[in-house]
Image (spheres, coloured by chain):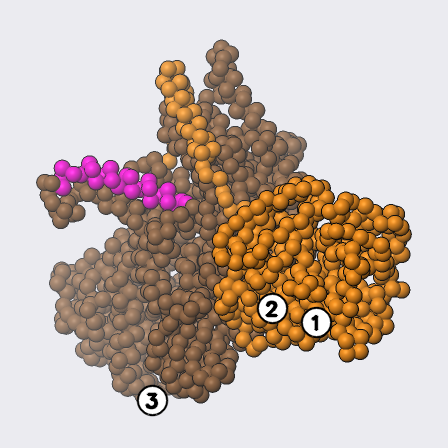
Chain colours: A orange, B brown
């Protein structure tokens, strides 16, 4: 116990000893501060993780076959609408899809599906579940057998709102529920009856849903071809459609379809890039498009020796596409694409033609040819560039582009005879999703 | 006054030579002459016989083991009855009646013909004013009941003849005819309680007993105070207490009405056990044994009781219930016991205060009835001082009032059920904490077998103050912490010799220290407790004193206090173990030569090893007292740095430098605490150098530690150093203030210099701190993390579902400061103590949650469902992307969406215990929080949706089924055949460790308590 200090002890110690002690204490405190600065900084805050979500390929639609082009063999897949929800490893990079959609486990590569029905072909990127998809394609007319395939790859029921747009107006929303791990098909003529100009807006309210639009046309018993219409994301004031096939032979005709979903009319301008140069078709420089109506405008009198890309600039957000029709043979919907970044795909057995568009094109390509030999090339140019891997076809191919120089790319796939046509936008089916690594923490349960 | 009574005085002697001369003299000097005196000596070995012989009293000798009743009977056999009006006067050899005693007794009985027995007022032999008895009774638990307080002085307060159940045989006057009619004293009661029995029998035979306070006798109570051996044959082991307790039980059992016997037997048993415990605590194992053995002796011989009851039945004319009015009510016994206990405690706490020092009212003026100047002829008008002057003379009243006002104003948002910051929601009852401590499996997250820290039961026990209303108790702690710390520190300073003014300044510095307010605002319950009890360190001073010469009782009292410290703050345990380990090592080093000389065995018993033994006890006992939690500390040393409760971020470096632990709700840095300045200035003072260096070193340690982040208790944060700073503050403030009291006046006498400068600077900072901190506390400081009655995070319906047999779990996801956090709830927010036992979820669940949040969780619902997670609750409703991810992940069906959050049901989730039959049929096994039970009709698998732990057990028809670790991380059991199953978590080891802890605790408590004294060790002057 401390005692009261007597008066006689109220004298300080000798100065030099005081200084030594003060120095000692100062050293102690400075040392402690130094340790505190040297201590490792906590690494617990906001750690990020990234992952590719699983993607869904459409089921066999129409009367033909559908094949999934997986990024590599032994990719984990499972069929939707199966009792079992277990994944299995694919035996090859090509997985045949029957009546049920295919769920591809997360991986950095992009899968696409090739549908072969009614004498035509169609391709679509296999996408992750999207809450908001726009389809500008298909028809509600008599000749059309277009159908919207809504795949719920989740394990709980899904709810989807579909808004159809006709050439006159937006139609009432139709809500569709899809049971867990199954899909549901809705015919477009039921959504937008009797109208050739159709746009669909699919909004997922709940569930893991991916939708595909399959467009097949017939005239009596005569098939007019088929295509898978790739979806578009939200409307934008700048839309780039990378590949539109044009021919000087006159067998090819193109129709521009546009929708202004907002409440104001849009003023648009089309710029078409081709190997022959860039130009704006007559009547497309400052053309007013009424809002809420699907507008089809034939792109007449277009002649080019090379495929073209279409850039739509608008003062209001728009969605757009271009229909390319081979007279009496097949048709294909060219849809917008997002900016190219890193992308890996597998084209086993196909010989696609790649089209790149952008102000300053500089894209690196690495691929393996059919013999498994690794090869690479650098594609450069301005406005538009074309690249063909040459004979023998390719297996996997990886594109690398500088994100600071926007480049948009697409593929033209034609069968051997050239009578069948499909456009495949080069965009990742599943974007590498970065998220904060969640931490288990009691603060989630406390104030 | 002449009477027609014949009085035969019967003196029984047994080694009573010490008191016998006075007894003989008293008999001889009676104002009312005794007709006949006869003595019986029961084998005295002293000179009692010589004394009787020399006094001319006829006597005869009996065996040494003869009982008192037998001796009286023998005496009466030899003295024929003189007439019908003969009275026998029983005189003990240690009881001297006053000269007027017999006359007063006879006068009383003469006026009351129904009286058969009369007894005098018994006063102490040595303290002649000490009132021993004015009649006696027996309590329903067998206690001898006099109705008097301990050491009660006779001031005539009990005067007046009155009926009593019995009177002591010492000085009892008994009508001989009635005595013989009743059969005399029961010979089964050789000594003790025979008086009560006789009185009881007299009443039921239609007589009455009176106490005559005008008749006085002085009694030494030689037998009951163990001044002479108890040699009677019935005295098993010759133990007075044993005989007394046995006889008490006997009296009750043979005299009470038959239908009250079970109740009486129960009371006897429970009271004996309680008394035995108290005696054990007082380190009187012999007495404890007497208590238990006494009841046993009676109960194992029912034949004796039956015979005695039959005998009494023959003599009974009135129901035994006639004596009910003499049995003391329970509340009287309780009041008397509590008063005795409080008296004992106050005597223990203030042993230096003697009776003489207690002011006694000596006159009417002393007690204020009239003034000292009552007789003064001139009335001088009193000069009333103004109120401000009176208050100025007693500033502590003003400051205590001001502290109360500041405490209440600062706590205005903390009046209610508190939670927030480090403080989790408290359960409604403190008893919940006790049961939580006993459980080996905690329903936290996916389950935890972590050891509950000892502060949980300590807090649970302490809540008895509010009748186990734990929320109220915690609220009161946080509300009164400033005023309590102020008062406690003021008391410490004044005890240490400080004047009232300096005491108030020191208490103010302590009560407004940043560490206290940061702890309150952040909900640091452990640190608040530490701050409240840290000043007590000065009274055990383990840091500065060598304890080689300290008593063992003191050593164990220190370890108890330190154990409480450590229970609330493991960092203190770490520091204590380090400090005492270091000193133990030094002690060991100093004894190395002696060890070589004597060897370990002789060294242990050598007087030189007293110091090291005490050091060892100081080192080890707090660790043992905090078992099994302290074992976990040693296995995982980083846990030493975890504060009780939920980890939250605190300040670093410069905050610590200025003795401010920092963090949300802490006082801002510009409110400079004078603690560091005091510590630095104290280094210049020789006497305070050690304390200064220690305080500075402690602050330096705090600075270093605060920069390290540590994970645990379900989260992570930098090390909280509040307790360290609190101890540094408690170490440095008293010494400096005590020094300053003497030093500051000397400044006037020396030339202006640096001393003035330094003193002025410290004074300035202190004044600023004392003024600014309260202002901050009631303004910005009142907006703390801790708030009252905060809304629960988990939705109410999820809470309600938690009690269903499936015992669902819920994942709660929240986004705090951009960080996605989740925790698994059992239906409520995190509760008090839960964080301390929280462990990481299994890797399968962690991986699943990562995938879910990343949007790649296509299997998430399946995995979460397997772990019994039936709901997913997203608190962060503003995070649209997270909502879309969960909506799109599949397996999560939305149940509700409100502004407070969105709830999804996990499709196909398992209950807590699920049976999957061979035919793949499933059955929910109803589960409680502890176990699950059910009947199975076929073989299959039992899946327990809890974290895997090797102590999970399943008993199938009483047979243990081997535990398996499933590939998905769950504990499973393969059931081979149908039958009844019980699933439980085996807590045998946990309970064993807690039992060991309890044994250590009881032992240390007993060793730290003051030892009781056997009666023979108490000076007889103190007793009578």
Q: Which residue is the site of mark 3?
A: B314
- Magenta stretch bounds: B571-595
The numbered dot on residue A62 is none
Q: Is B757 rendered above or below residue B124? A: above
Same chain? Circles 3 and 2: no
Q: Nearer the viewer, residue B558 or A7?
A: B558
Q: Which of B977 and B404 is in front in this view?
A: B977
Pointer 2 indicates a residue of which chain? Answer: A
Query: The C terminus of chain B is located in which quarter?
Result: bottom left
Residue B592 in magenta stretch? yes
Q: Is residue B294 visible?
A: yes
Residue sitting at 83 percent across and 74 percent down?
A: A142
A390 sits left or right of A131 in the view: left
Closest to the camera, between mark 3 and mark 2, is 2
Q: Which of B946 and B7 is in front in this view?
A: B946
* Residue A262 image position (x, y, % from top left): 84, 56
Q: In which quarter of the image is residue B263?
A: bottom left
């Amino acid at each position: 116990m401390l005692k009261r200090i007597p008066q006689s002890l109220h004298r300080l110690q000798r100065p030099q000893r005081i200084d030594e002690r003060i120095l000692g204490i100062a050293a102690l405190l400075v040392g402690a501060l130094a340790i505190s600065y040297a201590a490792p900084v906590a690494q617990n805050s906001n750690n990020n993780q990234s992952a590719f979500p699983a993607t869904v390929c459409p089921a066999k639609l129409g009367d033909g076959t559908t094949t999934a082009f997986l990024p590599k063999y032994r990719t984990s897949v499972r069929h939707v609408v199966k009792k079992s929800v277990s994944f299995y490893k694919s035996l090859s990079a090509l997985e045949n899809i029957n009546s049920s959609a295919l769920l591809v486990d997360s991986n950095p590569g992009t899968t696409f599906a090739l549908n072969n029905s009614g004498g035509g072909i169609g391709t679509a990127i296999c996408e992750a579940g999207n809450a908001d998809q726009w389809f500008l394609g298909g028809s509600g007319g008599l000749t059309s057998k277009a159908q919207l395939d809504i795949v719920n790859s989740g394990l709980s029921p899904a709810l989807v709102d579909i808004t159809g747009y006709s050439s006159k107006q937006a139609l009432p929303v139709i809500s569709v529920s899809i049971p867990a791990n199954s899909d549901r098909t809705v015919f477009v003529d039921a959504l937008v009856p009797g109208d050739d100009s159709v746009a669909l807006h699919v909004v997922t309210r709940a569930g893991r849903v991916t939708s595909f639009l399959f467009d097949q046309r017939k005239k009596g018993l005569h098939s007019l071809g088929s295509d898978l219409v790739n979806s578009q994301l939200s409307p934008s004031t700048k839309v780039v459609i990378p590949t539109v096939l044009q021919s000087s032979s006159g067998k090819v005709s193109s129709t521009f379809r546009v929708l202004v979903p907002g409440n104001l009319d849009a003023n648009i301008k089309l710029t078409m890039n081709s190997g022959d140069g860039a130009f704006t078709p007559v009547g497309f420089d400052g053309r007013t498009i009424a809002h809420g109506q699907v507008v089809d405008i034939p792109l007449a009198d277009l002649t080019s020796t090379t495929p073209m890309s279409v850039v739509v600039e608008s003062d209001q957000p728009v969605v757009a596409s271009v229909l390319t029709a081979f007279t009496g043979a097949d048709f294909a919907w060219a849809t917008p694409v997002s900016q190219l970044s890193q992308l890996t795909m597998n084209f086993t057995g196909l010989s696609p033609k790649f089209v790149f568009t952008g102000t300053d094109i500089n894209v690196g390509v690495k691929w393996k040819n059919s013999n498994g030999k690794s090869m690479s090339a650098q594609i450069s140019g301005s406005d538009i560039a074309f690249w063909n891997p040459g004979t023998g076809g390719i297996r996997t191919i990886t594109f690398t582009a500088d994100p600071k120089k926007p480049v948009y790319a697409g593929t033209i796939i034609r069968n051997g005879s050239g009578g069948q046509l499909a456009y495949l936008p080069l965009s990742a089916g599943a974007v590498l999703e970065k998220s904060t690594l969640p931490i288990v923490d009691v603060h989630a349960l406390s104030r | 006054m002449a009477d027609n009574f014949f009085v035969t005085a019967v003196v029984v002697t047994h080694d009573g030579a010490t008191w016998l001369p006075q007894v003989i003299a008293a008999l001889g000097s009676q104002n009312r002459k005794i007709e006949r005196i006869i003595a019986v000596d029961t084998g005295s070995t002293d000179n009692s016989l010589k004394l009787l012989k020399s006094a001319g009293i006829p006597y005869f000798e009996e065996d040494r083991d003869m009982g008192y009743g037998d001796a009286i009977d023998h005496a009466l056999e030899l003295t024929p009855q003189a007439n019908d009006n003969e009275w026998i006067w029983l005189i003990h050899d240690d009881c001297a009646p006053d000269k007027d005693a017999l006359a007063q007794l006879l006068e009383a009985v003469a006026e009351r013909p129904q009286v058969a027995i009369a007894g005098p007022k018994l006063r102490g032999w040595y303290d002649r004013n000490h009132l021993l008895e004015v009649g006696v009774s027996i309590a329903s638990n067998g206690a001898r009941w006099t109705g008097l307080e301990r050491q009660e002085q006779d001031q005539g307060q009990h005067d007046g003849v009155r009926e009593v159940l019995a009177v002591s045989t010492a000085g009892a006057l008994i009508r001989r005819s009635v005595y013989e009619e009743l059969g005399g004293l029961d010979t089964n009661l050789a000594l003790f309680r025979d008086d009560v029995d006789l009185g009881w029998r007299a009443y039921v035979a239609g007589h009455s007993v009176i106490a005559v306070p005008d008749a006085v006798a002085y009694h030494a109570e030689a037998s009951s105070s163990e001044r002479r051996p108890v040699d009677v044959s019935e005295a098993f082991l010759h133990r007075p207490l044993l005989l007394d307790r046995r006889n008490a039980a006997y009296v009750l059992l043979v005299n009470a009405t038959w239908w009250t016997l079970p109740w009486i037997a129960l009371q006897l048993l429970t009271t004996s056990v309680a008394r035995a415990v108290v005696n054990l605590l007082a380190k009187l194992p012999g007495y404890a044994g007497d208590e238990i053995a006494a009841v046993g002796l009676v109960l194992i011989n029912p034949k004796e009781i039956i015979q005695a009851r039959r005998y009494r039945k023959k003599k009974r004319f009135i129901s035994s219930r006639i004596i009910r009015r003499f049995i003391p009510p329970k509340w009287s016994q309780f009041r008397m016991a509590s008063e005795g206990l409080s008296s004992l405690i106050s005597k223990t706490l203030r042993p230096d205060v003697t009776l003489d020092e207690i002011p006694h009212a000596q006159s009417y003026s002393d007690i204020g009835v009239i003034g000292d100047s009552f007789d003064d002829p001139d009335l001088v008008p009193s000069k009333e001082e103004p109120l401000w002057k009176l208050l100025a003379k007693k500033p502590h009243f003003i400051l205590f009032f001001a502290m109360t006002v500041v405490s209440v104003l600062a706590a205005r948002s903390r009046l209610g059920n508190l939670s927030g910051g480090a403080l989790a929601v408290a359960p409604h009852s403190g008893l919940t904490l006790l049961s939580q401590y006993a459980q080996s499996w905690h329903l936290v997250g996916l389950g935890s077998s972590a050891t509950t820290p000892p502060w949980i039961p300590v807090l649970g026990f302490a809540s008895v103050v509010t009748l186990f209303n734990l929320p109220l108790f915690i609220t009161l702690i946080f509300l009164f912490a400033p005023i309590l710390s102020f008062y406690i520190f003021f008391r410490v300073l004044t005890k240490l010799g400080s004047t009232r003014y300096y005491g108030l300044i020191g208490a103010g510095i302590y009560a407004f220290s940043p560490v206290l307010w940061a702890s309150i605002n952040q909900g640091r319950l452990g640190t608040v407790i530490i701050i409240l009890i840290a000043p007590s360190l000065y009274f055990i001073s383990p840091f500065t004193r060598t304890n080689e010469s300290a008593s063992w009782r003191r050593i164990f009292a220190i370890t108890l206090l330190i154990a409480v410290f450590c229970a609330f703050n493991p960092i203190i345990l770490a520091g204590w173990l380090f400090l005492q380990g270091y000193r133990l090592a030094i002690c060991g080093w100093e004894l190395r030569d002696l060890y070589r000389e004597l060897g370990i065995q002789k060294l242990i018993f050598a007087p030189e090893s007293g110091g090291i033994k005490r050091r060892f006890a100081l080192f080890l006992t707090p660790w043992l007292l905090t078992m099994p939690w302290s074992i976990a500390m040693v296995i995982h040393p980083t846990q030493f740095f975890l504060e009780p409760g939920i980890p939250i971020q605190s300040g670093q470096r410069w905050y610590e430098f200025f003795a401010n632990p920092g963090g949300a709700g802490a006082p801002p840095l510009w409110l400079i605490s004078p603690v560091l300045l005091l510590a630095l200035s104290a280094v210049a003072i020789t006497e305070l150098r050690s304390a200064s260096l220690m305080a500075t070193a402690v602050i330096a340690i705090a600075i270093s530690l605060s920069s390290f982040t540590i994970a645990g208790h379900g989260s992570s944060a930098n090390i909280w150093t509040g307790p360290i700073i609190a101890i540094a503050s408690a170490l440095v403030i008293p010494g400096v203030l005590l020094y300053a009291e003497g030093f500051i006046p000397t400044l006037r006498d020396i030339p202006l210099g640096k001393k003035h400068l330094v003193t002025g600077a410290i004074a300035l900072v202190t004044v600023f701190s004392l003024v600014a901190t309260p202002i901050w506390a009631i303004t910005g400081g009142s907006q703390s993390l801790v708030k009252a009655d905060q809304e629960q995070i988990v939705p109410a319906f999820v809470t309600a579902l938690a009690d269903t047999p499936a015992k669902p779990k819920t994942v709660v996801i929240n986004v705090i400061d951009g960080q996605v956090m989740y925790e698994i709830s059992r239906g409520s927010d995190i509760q008090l103590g839960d964080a301390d036992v929280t462990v990481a979820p299994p890797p399968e669940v962690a991986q699943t949650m990562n995938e879910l949040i990343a949007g790649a969780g296509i299997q998430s619902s399946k995995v979460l469902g397997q772990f019994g997670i039936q709901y997913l609750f997203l608190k962060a409703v503003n995070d649209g992307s997270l909502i879309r991810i969960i909506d799109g992940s599949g397996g999560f069906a939305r149940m509700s969406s409100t502004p407070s959050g969105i709830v999804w049901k996990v499709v196909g989730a398992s209950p807590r215990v699920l049976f999957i039959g061979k035919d793949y049929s499933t059955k929910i096994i109803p589960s409680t929080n502890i176990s699950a039970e059910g009947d199975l009709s076929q073989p299959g698998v039992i899946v327990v949706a809890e974290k895997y732990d090797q102590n999970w057990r399943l008993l199938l028809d009483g047979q243990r089924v081997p535990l398996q670790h499933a590939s998905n991380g769950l504990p499973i059991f393969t059931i081979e055949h149908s039958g009844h199953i019980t699933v439980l978590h085996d807590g045998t080891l946990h309970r064993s460790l807690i039992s060991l802890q309890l044994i250590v605790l009881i032992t240390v408590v007993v060793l730290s308590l003051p030892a009781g004294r056997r009666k023979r060790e108490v000076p007889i002057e103190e007793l009578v």
